Image: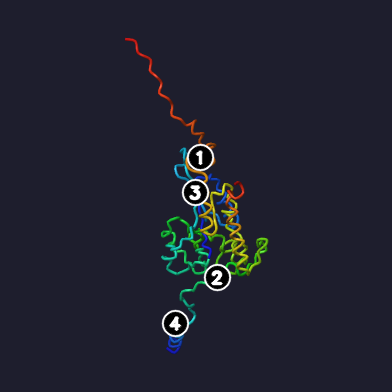
């Protein structure tokens, strides 16, 4: 009888503590991205552009975009 | 402020799939996932047209609107990106997107759907710019290196233009004004013959029948 009581008490304790091991299931929040011109760990950064310089980044991108216009070269 | 956009010129695209290959190579895109595809209308028929399609980085992106876990965000440059740590791979974005941009890698056994993958305009994700973690999840971050997307930069006919919307729209406008349309278009004669070659056959006069 005493053994049965002990077993039932152990089962009750385990079932009551079961929820303590659960991981929180709240929604994860999105990571915040840094600005594209702020920094870069890449060793392949374009020549003439230093990460962190927004004006230089703007110039670099504009030059590259305009170089897609071959009429500048042919006319 | 720049607003990054792609334009594909259907008169110039020669369906070489160079943009598709460049994208796959640049970002180590897994087998079965195509961030960019070349779509051809009336394939095999004279006058067929091809365009290169990927995420159009919509100003009012439907994928962003339907995502139940809010994993999408838009950068200052107008590039629509997502956080793979938050994505649950539900596929709603795939149904919402009119361009078929969101792709899902089969992940493990039984065709289990993995986290969504799409064109990033070569701008990576929320991890540190140019980091190993960013490369593993999203591919290379060329924009932070001061470069434009690989697909547009390597397009041999410059059919695919990428960059600030105002700049690429100006290039396209200049091009259309210069080249005209129809048989005047560059390359048309090589592909489909000169206008005189395609003249309809003259009706042959019938010989009078003997009665």
Q: SS class of the residue under badge 1?
A: helix
Depth check, front residue: A21 or A1: A21
Residue B37 percent across, percent down from the top left: 51, 51
CB contact under 8 Å: marks 3 and 1: no
Point 68% across, 61% down: residue: A47
Badge 3: chain ID: B
Element assignment for label 3: strand
Judge the density around disc 2: few (<14), some (14-19), many (≥20) Cα neighbours within 10 Å: some
Which chain does tag 1 point to?
A: B
Badge 4 marks a residue whose secondary structure is helix
In the rendered image, residue B115, in percent from the top left (x then y), is placed at: 50, 63
Q: Where residue B58 appears, x then y in whole percent? A: 46, 61
Q: CA distance from mark 1 to mark 4?
A: 81 Å
Nearer to the camera, B135 or B81: B81
Q: Which residue is mark 1?
A: B184
Residue B33 visible from this viewpoint: no
Q: CA distance from mark 4 to mark 3?
A: 61 Å
Q: Nearer the viewer, mark 4 or mark 3?
A: 3
Q: Residue at 54% of width from left, 49% of height from top?
A: B159
The chain identifier of the residue carrying mark 2 reads A
Residue receiving disc 3 = B51
> Residue tagged by mark 2?
A33
Q: To which quarter of the image does residue A53 belong? A: bottom right
């Amino acid at each position: 009888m005493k053994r049965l009581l002990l077993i039932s008490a152990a089962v009750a304790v385990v079932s009551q503590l079961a929820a303590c091991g659960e991981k929180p299931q709240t929604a994860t929040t999105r990571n915040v991205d840094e600005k594209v011109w702020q920094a870069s760990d890449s060793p392949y950064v374009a020549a003439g552009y230093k990460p962190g310089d927004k004006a230089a980044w703007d110039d670099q991108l504009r030059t590259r975009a305009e170089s897609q216009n071959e009429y500048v070269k042919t006319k | 402020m720049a607003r990054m956009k792609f334009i594909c010129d259907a008169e110039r695209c020669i369906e070489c799939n160079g943009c598709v290959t460049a994208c796959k190579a640049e970002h180590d895109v897994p087998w079965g996932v195509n961030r960019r595809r070349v779509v051809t209308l009336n394939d095999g028929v004279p006058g067929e047209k091809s365009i290169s399609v990927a995420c159009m980085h919509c100003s009012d992106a439907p994928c962003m609107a339907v995502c139940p876990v809010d994993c999408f965000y838009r950068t200052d440059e107008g590039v629509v990106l997502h956080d793979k740590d938050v994505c649950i791979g539900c596929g709603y974005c795939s149904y919402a997107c009119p361009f078929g941009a969101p792709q899902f890698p089969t992940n493990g056994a039984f065709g289990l759907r993995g986290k969504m993958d799409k064109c990033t305009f070569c701008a990576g994700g929320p991890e540190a710019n140019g980091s190993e973690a960013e490369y593993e999840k999203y591919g290379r971050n060329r924009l932070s290196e001061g470069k434009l997307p690989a697909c547009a930069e390597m397009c041999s006919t410059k059919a695919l233009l990428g960059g600030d919307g105002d700049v690429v729209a100006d290039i396209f406008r200049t091009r259309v004004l210069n080249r005209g349309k129809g048989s005047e278009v560059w390359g048309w004669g090589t592909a489909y013959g000169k206008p005189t070659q395609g003249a309809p056959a003259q009706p042959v006069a019938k010989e009078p029948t003997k009665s």
